[in-house]
Image (tube, rainbow, N blue to C red):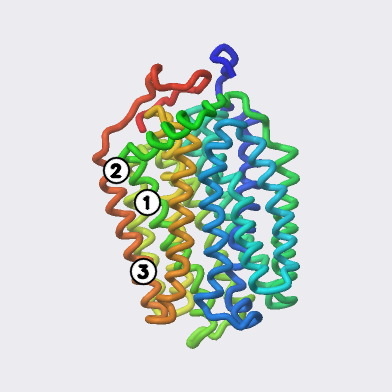
Amino acid sequence: MSAERAVEGYRPGTTEYRRVLVALFAAGLATFALLYSTQALLPELAREFEVSTAQSTLSMSLTMLGLGLAILVAGPWSDVVGRTGPIRLSMTASGVVAVACALAPSWEALLALRFLEGVVLAGLPAVATAYLREELHPSTHARAAGLYVGGTAMGGMAGRLVTGPLGELAGWRWALAGAAALGLACALAVHLLLPASRNFVAAPTGVRQLASMARRAVSDPALLALYAIGGCAIGALVAVFNTIGFRLAEPPFDLGLGAASLVFLVYAVGSGSSVASGRLADALGRRAVPPVGCAVAIAGLLLTLVPSLPVVVLGMAVLTAGFFAVHSVASGWVPARAHAGGVSSGQAASLYLFTYYLGSAVFGSLAGQAWSVAAWPGVVGLATLLMVLAAGLALLLRRTPTLLVAPTTSRPGAIPASRPH
């Protein structure tokens, strides 16, 4: 798009603004429902396929790994071909692969399909925040990112709540089929509602240019800190959620699969936290929110050590609220900071999400080992360490210089940012 054709981003109150938010909310819901569809089923999968706790977590970790690797390609690809095409393709393909997961004939086949699921899911998270930055008015960026992340929170909750009860009633295959149906329904909504890009500008396609963009995306200390914050924060959350089902199945709780899956209702708190933290970031600045979110998450982790079901659920809710406060601000900050520094938004978002899902894959699997060695205190210790690291990085970010979008670093046709990053 030329500079002459650039148009102002959609503002709140317009039909197009609502369509963008509804479409990306649905896309986030589907993506994370499918991504986490086996998490509530881990005890069932361990029994069905006669694998260990640590081995059962591979159905999550391999999906995260596939997603993280594919994001490294999907982000730069979207910088060349556009934003809406990868989002729509990702939604359709992920629904089809989810159906195949429900029909997997063996444990090895299920793991291979779950890895493939992660690969095809990459189109949305690699692109969503860059699309929001380009198509919405700058004054709404943090708020819209919070709403999008809220959709991912609801998706994470929906995936577990659909699969947990269905898994107990009809088995893991019907549980995964239910998640696939949800994904396909959301894919249809995305196809019908998501407006085409108006302010996308294709990036250079040469190898030298792409290498230069990648080098610049890892040269800003603030971006590096944001990448690491995402990896540590999601690692802590997934470590806890991967193993909570095993804890609740043992004394003093002795819950079945369906009842234990109800703990994932706390993800609704994440949706509200994402929206609230986005508004706070717009009002107070992004730097103020992540350290507080980390402190809240650590408080939630400590509460889960109490051997009382209501207190454990409260702790999970507090952890979830703190995590989503951190992630919603950090994920929206990355493309804004990148754009202000003349770095490709798609490239920076891809690197953030690569670190994010690498953290999920690595620490999600380590949680299984921590459970085997030291039970729940071991899991909480691992997660707390990760959140302390994220908090330290968030505090360092408060000392990094701010960047303002300058005309010499803005891409043609881009909407200038209205605040420092």
Q: Amino acid at mark 1?
A: Ile
Residue 143 visible to an observer of this rendering: yes
Which numbered circle lies on residue 57? none
At a point 69% along the width and 41% down the height, the residue shown is 88
Farthest residue to the bottom: give it: 251
Which numbered circle lies on residue 397? 2
Residue linked to disc 1: 229
**Quarter of the image where one finds residue 299:** bottom left
The x and y percentages for residue 329 are 43, 44
Residue 376 left/right relative to 177: left
The x and y percentages for residue 61 are 52, 64
**Quarter of the image where one finds residue 77:** top right
Q: Secondary structure at mark 1?
A: helix
Mark 3 crowd level (few <14, some 14–19, many ≥20, 10 Å Cα): some
Quadrant location of the C terminus in the rendered image: top left
Q: Amino acid at mark 2?
A: Leu
Residue linked to disc 3: 382
At a point 60% along the width and 49% down the height, the residue shown is 28
N-terminal-most mark, 2 or 3: 3
N-terminal-most mark, 1 or 3: 1
- The image shows residue 159, relative to residue 55, as above or below, that is above
Residue 318 visible to an observer of this rendering: no
- The image shows residue 343, relative to residue 5, as above or below, that is below
> How far separated are the C-alphas under marks 2 and 3?
23 Å
The x and y percentages for residue 344 are 46, 32
Q: Amino acid at mark 3?
A: Leu
Contact? badges 1 and 2 (CB < 8 Å): yes
In front here: 276 or 59? 59
The x and y percentages for residue 63 are 57, 60
At a point 69% along the width and 74% down the height, the residue shown is 106
Mark 1 crowd level (few <14, some 14–19, many ≥20, 10 Å Cα): many
